[in-house]
Image (cartoon, helix red, strand yellow):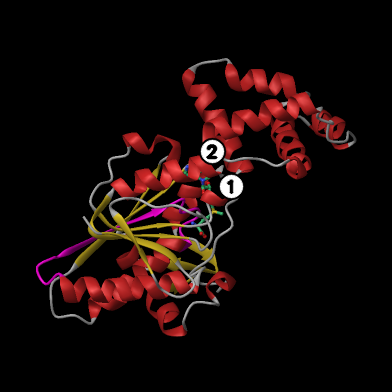
Amino acid sequence: MGAAMTDRWSIKNTPAMDMEQFQLWQALLEDRTGMTLSTERKTFLETSLSIRMRELGIEDYDTYYEHLMVGTTQTRAMEWSVLVDRLTVQETSFFRHPGSFALVEEFVQRFMAEQPDAANLDVWSVGCSTGEEAYSLAMLINEQFCGNDRKLFYGITATDISLPTLSKARRGEYPARRILQVDPSLREKYFLPSENGQTVSVAPQLKERICFARLNVLDLGNAPMNNMDLIFCQNMLIYFRRWRKRQIVNRLAERLAPGGMLILGPGEVTDWQHPDLERVHFADTLAFRRCR
Ligand SMILES: C[S@@+](CC[C@H](N)C(=O)[O-])C[C@H]1O[C@@H](n2cnc3c(N)ncnc32)[C@H](O)[C@@H]1O
């Protein structure tokens, strides 16, 4: 974008969006990602779209909407991929919800005790954002498996709708302050500081156990994951409507191995039951185990 264009934009305010336009964008976002955008977040939508429109030299919302609908499949997909990254909430952290991670620890110990012949633990982090959740799971499982004489392996599939977010996750490089809440012994073992001390990189022994891949949870029917021992899905369903949350957790339940566990965020799904799953009672968690 030329300097003249930048100046022209910088003196302009973000264009106001009327209610009809807002509803159109709301519907598009929900249809493609499942996320609902409340009216309180209209300003957020206006600002995010305006920033992107400015980058493209587009001046009004209708033209940008049109831009997302026309063109080749590839250009439309590329533009949508940029936009979805701007409109989704990617907030995350290492060991974000301690109760859920305490349950994972207990689950892994039980897995080792109850399944003496099992050699492989398959884990899925759904809506993994920039990777902190998947790396936390890897640290925890690695710690349990290291202290065991048996040859045990684990693999983590970590999926998200946002491609830029997944690139960050694969890179596994974080500002040093982001690991301050990680236990010092884990920090020492699993993170390599950069020369200037500003950033840290996740150790290769964790990276090689995780496969980051793009997956929209609205397309779970086509997902290749099956027989998972552990499915961890937190802070994503909160943005979805009740019926859709239920549809998604039903589909996740089908992907569990017998004895496998589904761990959601506390309170994220209420009054949900599945004929093949039983509720796991563990303090401050929302979890289910596949019983058949
Ligand atoms: C708030 S983050 C949660 C990250 C992590 N699970 C945690 O609890 O810290 C929500 C993530 O869900 C992803 N997401 C939103 N809609 C999605 C969809 N339809 N399919 C897959 N991922 C989606 C977003 O891109 C974002 O990275």
Decide: is 289 above or below 179: above
Decide: is 7 above or below 62: below
Residue displayed at 41% across by 84% down = 185
Q: Nearer the viewer, residue 72 or 257?
A: 257
Q: Which comes before the other along the chain, label 2 or label 1? A: 2
Q: Is residue 18 covered in magenta?
A: no
Which numbered dot is residue 34?
2
Callout 2–callout 1 Cβ contact below 8 Å: yes
Q: Residues within 10 Å of mark 2 (few under 14, many from 20)?
A: many
Residue displayed at 48% across by 57% down = 234
Q: Is residue 222 left or right of residue 244?
A: left
Query: Which residue is labeled 1 in the image?
Result: 239
Magenta stretch in the rendered image: 115-132
Secondary element under disc 2, as helix, strand or loop, is loop
Image position, residue 276 (x, y; %): 28, 52
The residue at label 2 has a CB less than 8 Å from ligand 1: yes
